[in-house]
Image (cartoon, rainbow, N blue to C red):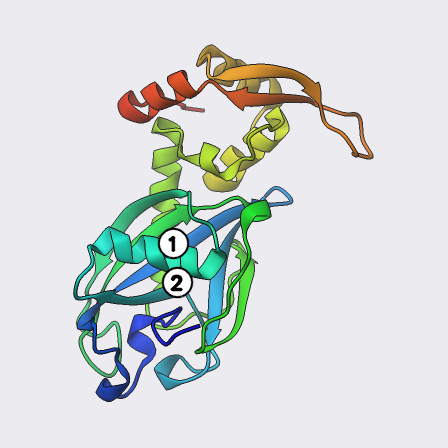
Amino acid sequence: MTNDSLLLAPEMDKEELLPDDCMKNLSVDNLIYAMEDGKLKVLLAKYKQGAAANKWGLIGHWVKLDEDIESAAHRVVTQATGVKNFHLDQLATFGNVKRYPLRRIITIAYYAFVRMNEVNIIHGDNTHEVAWFDVKQLPELIFDHKEIILASLDHLKYKVRHEPIGFSLLPEKFTLLQLQEIYEAILDTKLDKPNFRRKIQKMNLLINCKEKQTDVAHRAAALFRFDINVYEKLKDFGFNFEY
C-alpha cells in the first residue's frame, strides 16, 4: 500500500509526514458497517504511530487537493475493504477546536454499508490491525471517534425507519429473518416477528424467489429479493416504518 492508503488523518504528529497532494487540516472518517451473525459491526483500525499509536480508531484519510469530499470517503472505503459498490452517505462534520490534541483538524464523517461476504480487508502501512467490532462492544477509541459512532447510530435509527438504507447490508437473496435482524440491530430492540413481516409485506417491496436456503442445519427458510423498481421509489420518496 502507498502512503496515501488507510492513514487516519489526525494521527500524524509531524507536518512533513503529510502527503504533498492532500489538504492539511481536512479529513474524512469512515464508519464502515456490515452485518455478521445478526450483529451490526463497524470496521476499526489500530494505528502504529503518532497520537493514535496502538489505539483503535475509525478508518480515514486526508482529503486530496484535487478530489471531492465524497470521492475521498469512497476511496477510503474501497481501499480498506476492496468493495467498490456500496451505500455511502454523509453523517456530519466534526470540528471541535480540541478534538485533536496537537492542532486544528476538521473531519467529515461518512457511513458506508458493505456486505461482509464481499469484504477483503486491506491493511495500510500505518495499521497494526484492522478488525470488525460489534457496535455494542467497542474498544477504547481515539479522539472523538466514540462520539462519531454514537452520533451515527442515532442517525441510523431514524434513517432506517424512513428509507431502505439497511437493505444494502443484505445479499442479493436473503431470508426474512436476515432482514429483521438488520432492523433489530440498528434500532437496538427486539421486534415481533409476525408484526414485522406484515409491515414489510405491505410495502410490496419483496419478490419471493421460490427458493429455499441450502446447506443450513436448521429448517431451510424461503429466500427473497428486492423489487428494484419499488426499492428505487422508496429511496426517493421514503416510507414510515414505525413500531
Q: Is residue 18 left or right of residue 149?
A: left
The amino acid on which the numbered mark 2 sits, given as a three-letter code, is Lys
The picture quadrant where one finds residue 177 is: top right
| Mark 1 residue element | helix
Disc on res. 150: 1
* Residue 227 visible to the viewer: yes
Please tell me which residue is depicted at 29% across the width and 86% down the height of the picture.
13
The amino acid on which the numbered mark 1 sits, given as a three-letter code, is Leu
Q: Nearer the viewer, residue 24 or 10?
A: 24
Q: Nearer the viewer, residue 19 or 127?
A: 19
Task: Give the x, y percent position of residue 146.
Answer: 39, 62
| Whether residue 63 is situated above or below residue 55 in the rendered picture | above
Q: Nearer the viewer, residue 39 or 236?
A: 236
Q: Is residue 169 left or right of residue 61?
A: right
Disc 1 vs disc 2: Cβ atoms closer than 8 Å?
A: yes
Please tell me which residue is depicted at 35% across the width and 35% down the height of the picture.
159
Task: Residue lying at the far right in this picture: please name it.
Answer: 217
Q: Nearer the viewer, residue 116 or 194?
A: 116
Q: Which residue is mark 2?
A: 146
| Mark 2 residue element | helix
Q: Cα distance, mark 1 to mark 2?
A: 6 Å
The picture quadrant where one finds residue 180 is: top right
Image quarter in which the C terminus is found: top left
Task: Give the x, y percent position of residue 171.
Answer: 56, 35
* Residue 189 visible to the viewer: no
Please tell me which residue is depicted at 28% across the width and 49% down the height of the picture.
91
The picture quadrant where one finds residue 61 is: bottom left
Image quarter in which the N terminus is found: bottom left
| Whether residue 150 is situated above or below residue 195 in the rendered picture | below
Task: Give the x, y percent position of residue 124.
Answer: 45, 72
